[in-house]
Image: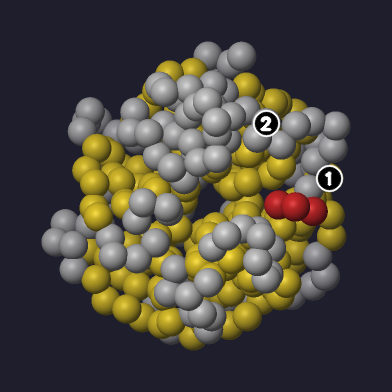
Amino acid sequence: MSETSIWSGEILSLGEGPLTHHLRGSLIWVDINEARLYERAWDENITRVTVLEVLPSAAGIVDDATVLLATETDMRTLNLDTGVQETLIAFPHDDEMRANDGRVHPSGAFWIGTMAKDGRGRPGAIYRLFEGELSLMIEDVVTPNSICFAADGTFAYYTDTPTMSIMKVPTDPKTGEISGKARVFVKVEGVPGGPDGSVTDSEGNLWNARWGGSSIDVYSPAGERIHAYKVPVRQPTCPSFVGPDLDRIVTTSASVGLSDPDPLHDGATIELHVPAKGRPEPIVKL
């Protein structure tokens, strides 16, 4: 197993959506099932908790006090200092669906996937929010995950986890719209678990949390798996780079569904002590 430590020890049901907020020097993440948002500064040992009235899933940076938050019902802004929220646009789905994985494209467009709350219902989709308009990008996605982008905005990655394939698709660098045909970037085969959340690093490598596989896998831009870092959680959900130089990496995790979860690790946020170098997340263009 790779050298790891507990970065933040709250045990979450479905820890997800880690956002490195470089303007605040903090990491933001959520517990989808328990409707909570967490924030922890890189130089502090205190985790702040915000209790929400809706299920959150992913966030993007608006400014040094505000994030764009995807929830089960809508996209909204949240002021992290005051708690004030403002709904921007509702999702075109009913109360059996919710948001899941999402991230900001270098253009400022926010990509967000939706899925059935029970994880087994009808398929969801991947949408793009850009300059106030929500547009449908990809239909019939059961469990959207792994949304992340090339630094220059020329392509995106995503997965529908049950397919066991991470896809790569060309995008318009100025708008984040899909501009070409998707192809398989990685087929996850011969290992336990399936692809969950991902982030790209400063060299263009993709770091993917393998749900059910206790691993953070690193793929080169050519799609070759160059590292498989074992972690002490069975269900890692999404990695994120932290620290003033973005040279540390953590992963959120989930305890939901485990019959005998590790009481210290499963559901906690774990730091991997491995060489890493991220890049700042783009700012949302509302």
Rendering quarter of residue 1 = top right
Is residue 204 rendered to the left or right of residue 101? Answer: right
| C-alpha separation, residue under disc 1 versus residue under disc 2 | 15 Å
| Residue 241 visible here | no
Q: Nearer the viewer, residue 233 or 8?
A: 233
Residue sitting at the far front: 259
Is residue 105 rendered to the left or right of residue 62? Answer: right
From the image, tell me which residue sits under label 2.
Answer: 213
Q: Amino acid at mark 2?
A: Gly
Location of residue 129 in the rendering, given as x and y in whole percent from the top left corner? 50, 76
Residue visible at 76% across and 58% down in the picture: 168
Location of residue 88 in the rendering, given as x and y in whole percent from the top left corner? 36, 81
Residue visible at 53% across and 84% down in the picture: 92
Residue sitting at the far left: 82
Colouring convention used in this rendered image of the protein: secondary structure
Badge number at residue 219: none
Helix, strand or loop status at disc 2: loop
The quarter of the image holding the C terminus is: bottom left
Q: Nearer the viewer, residue 181 or 118?
A: 118
Graded by Cα atoms within 10 Å as few (under 14), some (14 to 19) or many (20 or more), the crowding at tag 1 reads some
Q: Nearer the viewer, residue 147 or 32?
A: 32
| Residue 135 visible here | yes
From the image, tell me which residue sits under label 1.
Answer: 187
Rendering quarter of residue 248 = top left
- 1 or 2: tag closer to the N-terminus: 1
Location of residue 52 in the rendering, given as x and y in whole percent from the top left corner? 28, 60
Helix, strand or loop status at disc 1: strand
